[in-house]
Amino acid sequence: MLALFERIQREFHAVIEGIDPLLLDEPPAPGANSIGWLAWHVTRSHDRNVSELQGREQLWILEGWHTKFSREPDPAETGFGHTPDQAAAFRSPEPEVVLAYHDAVVDMINHYLTHAPPGDLDREVFSPTFGDTRTVQRRLVGVLTDALQHLGQLAYARGILEASRDDFSGPESR
């Protein structure tokens, strides 16, 4: 499972590194989520879920990441349930901050997964987001599945936005 979180981290870096910061908050189409919102949502989901599994405070609050994103220290705000207007109003910090938060969360996950007590994946836990009880393993699978889907969206959105810039520059610049 740790290998999947690390793979997501590598792919996350591939999308965010070197991106024009202006593209983070530009939706690839009207009504679509921006790269910055999607990247924040993926990382917040990782942070919230794995912190809850450990019974610890989220890095979002503990390490003050909320201030670096100019957000409130609300442990429930992960983007889940955001309206299109809320997602559109989201403003990203610099790409380096987005990457640093994601890396800090993956480090926390790595520590948890390498030090979890034997049998912890079979432990049943309540999910405040969905209002149900699942095993740790099922909850982590859900987090990973969601992240993989959003990674595809992130990469696709960057491709669309960068291609649209190329289209505006005309054939003489190619």
Image: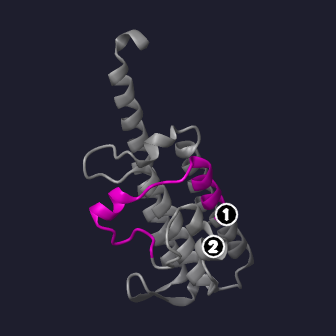
Circle 1 SS class: helix
Q: How many discs appear? A: 2
Most foreground residue, 59 or 142: 59
Most foreground residue, 90 or 171: 90
**As drawn, is 160 to the left or to the right of 94?**
left
**As drawn, is 65 to the left or to the right of 40?**
right
Most foreground residue, 45 or 98: 98
Compute the Cα span from label 1 to label 2.
8 Å
Disc 2 crowd rating (10 Å Cα; few below 14, some 14-19, many 20+) is: some
Residue type at tag 2: Leu
Residue 58 sits above or below residue 94 on the image = below
Instruction: Give percent across and percent down for residue 131.
Output: 38, 88
Q: Are marks 1 and 2 in contact (CB under 8 Å)?
A: yes
Whichever of callouts 1 and 2 sits on the residue coming sooner in the sequence is 2
At horizontal 53% and vertical 39% (from top left) the residue drawn is 19
**As drawn, is 154 to the left or to the right of 59?**
left
Residue 133 found in image quarter = bottom left
Whether 129 is among the magenta residues is: no
At horizontal 35% and vertical 12% (from top left) the residue drawn is 171
Quarter of the picture containing the N terminus is bottom right
Q: Which residues are magenta?
A: 77-104
Residue at the left extreme of this rendering: 30
Residue 61 found in image quarter = bottom right
Q: Which residue is mark 1?
A: 104
Whether 83 is among the magenta residues is: yes
Instruction: Give percent across and percent down for residue 124.
Output: 52, 90
Most foreground residue, 125 or 14: 14
Circle 2 SS class: helix
Q: Which residue is mark 2?
A: 59
Instruction: Give percent across and percent down for residue 93.
Output: 54, 53
Instruction: Give percent across and percent down for residue 37.
Output: 43, 57
Quarter of the picture containing the C terminus is top left
